[in-house]
Amino acid sequence: MNALNGKVAVVTGGNSGIGYASARKLKEQGARVLITGRSAERVKKAADELGVDGLVADVSSVNAIDELVKQSQKMYGRVDVLFVNAGIFIPAPVGKVSEELFDHQMDINFKGAVFTIEKFLPILNEGASIINLSSVNAYTGMSNTAIYAASKAALNAYTRTAATELAPKKIRVNAVNPGPVATPIFGKTGMEEEQLNEFAQAMQNRVPLKRLGQPDDIANLVAFLASDEASFITGGEYNIDGGIGVNHILG
Ligand code: NAD
């Protein structure tokens, strides 16, 4: 498949998990791909493995995003696919939400996503596709996710308005809402291995398809939304969650 031949794709947070798998898929489909992340070492390792370009840019810094856009423009001129994927998950129960946790999570998941789009806009081609990595957590009310969920719900709200306003430029903006996907994100919460395994098992039991998502499941949808085959799709939100969003009362 060469659905993305001639296109330039930027994947934020592309050195791990969903971003990594998506960068691989976008490249397989013919795109020139740039991945970003926070650690020079991890970005370089992933970029070398994937055979793509890599740059360090912490999306919680608007200056760093400005620099990333400048570098991208130098390297490619313009960009066709912007996969706004970088994100963190810090669980905390209501009543134990610190200002620091709130700011850190919102700075990366919402503010970082918004300013990635705002700053890349001037170098996006007509017909470009922006894909925002959100989460079914925006809707689930799952314990310990109040701020994470709010960061993703806010991103989905931004997605809809951006879709309306960018439509005259033929720039499409969509959100992808995964259910639980097997990536390193949960290991970064500080949970012990046993707790992590129990958490994964509990999640899996809740999924009607009885498995966790794999990064490639999400990458397939991202590659489709990135391509011109999705040229009539904008302002949408796509659950990709093994059915966890279905409110099955019995069964
Ligand atoms: P991951 O931890 O494997 O990858 C996250 C990526 O984001 C890494 O490359 C990391 O370097 C990058 N990142 C984090 N903070 C950054 C920052 N400040 N600046 C630049 N890059 C930064 O996790 P993942 O599961 O692949 O997560 C990718 C996205 O998917 C996130 O937005 C996450 O919220 C979302 N998501 C994940 C799941 C899941 O179950 N894994 C479910 C729904 C949504």
Image (tube, helix red, strand yellow):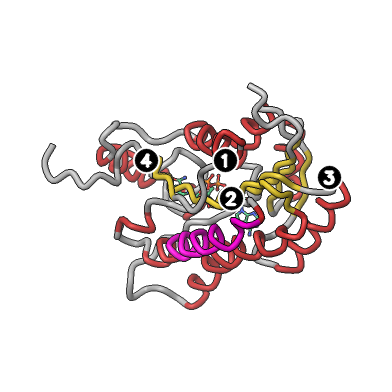
Along the line of sight, which residue is nearer the eye, 41 or 18?
18
- In the image, is residue 164 part of the stretch drawn in magenta? yes
Number of the front mark, 2 or 4:
2
Where residue 139 sits: x, y (%)?
A: 33, 57
**Residue 93 in view (yes/no):** yes
Residue type, label 2:
Arg
Residue 116's place in the image compared with 21, above or below, is: below
Q: Magenta span: helix, strand or loop, mainly?
A: helix
Name the residue: 50% across, 48% down. Answer: 185
Name the residue: 74% across, 43% down. Answer: 34
Number of the front mark, 1 or 3:
1
Give whichever of discs 1 and 4 has the lower sequence position: 1
The residue identified by callout 3 is: 76
The magenta region covers: 151-168
Give whichever of discs 3 and 2 has the lower sequence position: 3
Q: Under tag 2, what secondary structure?
A: strand
The residue identified by callout 4 is: 241
